[in-house]
Amino acid sequence: MRIILIGPPGVGKGTQSTRLVKHLDIPHLSTGDMLRRAFQDNSEVGRASQEYMSAGKLVPDPIILKLVDQRLEHDDCRRGYLLDGFPRTLGQAQALDAFLAERGTPLNAVVELKVDHDELVKRLAGRGRQDDRPEIVSERLQQYARQTSPLVEYYRKQGLLVVVDGIGTQDEVFHRIQAALARIAQKQRDSA
Ligand code: AMP
């Protein structure tokens, strides 16, 4: 399965992605993780991205697209993958669509994880990541609202979107995601 997990920072994408990829036995492609690794390795991509990341801004599309394109060419992606934190802009989504169309490997589902604003801020305050300082968190939430949330409509129009309530225990949310994926798979079979 080729799946996107979409949602604001703090919604639980990381936690749920980890569980989902284990369950589905597919690679977990987190652009945030890739960028943090690139920074630790002191690679060109890492150095170019650092100032954006530490300010809570989005890294420019060309850098991200190169990173993702390369990763998607790996053999382990043939059986599917979970994209976490990508795409984050309409430009990234369109570039991904073109990439997948060229290869005849369309997406199966886009899962939107949702929780209310106050809960997000509470969760982010408890994490202690470099970019989880209050002023940076607020910037990242704004970036999400402005640049990434339009993707929800984009994928809804493609019939790929499932919305999952992210409030509850990790188990509860995970079971909701599984049920949502089963629903969309059934819908796709019905319309085939
Ligand atoms: P994340 O771990 O997904 O919250 O990402 C951490 C930071 O990496 C973000 O605040 C951005 O600065 C950057 N980043 C990760 N993924 C992307 C992406 N798809 N497009 C642009 N910037 C990204």
Image (cartoon, rainbow, N blue to C red):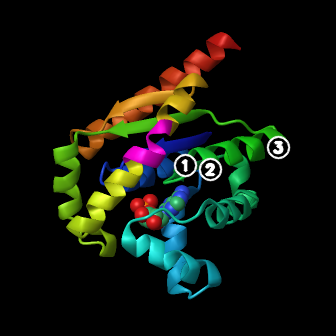
Q: Position of residue 100 (x, y in %)?
A: 75, 43
Whether residues under marks 1 and 2 lie with C-beta atoms below 8 angstroms apart, the answer is yes
Residue pictured at 38% horizontal, 71% vertical:
55
Label 3 sits on residue: 103
Q: Which residues are magenta?
A: 145-150
Outermost residue, top direction?
190
- In this rendering, would 9 be left or right of 24? left
Q: Nearer the viewer, mark 3 or mark 1?
A: 1
Residue pictured at 18% horizontal, 63% vertical:
125
- In this rendering, would 149 be left or right of 10? right
Label 1 CB-ligand 1 distance < 8 A: yes
Label 1 sits on residue: 89
Label 2 CB-ligand 1 distance < 8 A: yes
Q: Amino acid at mark 2?
A: Gln
User: Is 63 above or below relative to 181?
Assistant: below
Residue pictured at 69% horizontal, 53% vertical:
77
Q: Does dot 1 land on a helix, a strand or a loop?
A: loop
Q: Is residue 146 magenta?
A: yes
Q: Amino acid at mark 1?
A: Thr
Judge by depth and name the residue closer to the eye, 90 or 178: 90
- Residue 92 shows which numbered tag? 2
**Quadrant of the snapshot with the N terminus:** top right
Q: Does dot 3 land on a helix, a strand or a loop?
A: helix
- Residue 55 shows which numbered tag? none
**Quadrant of the snapshot with the C terminus:** top right
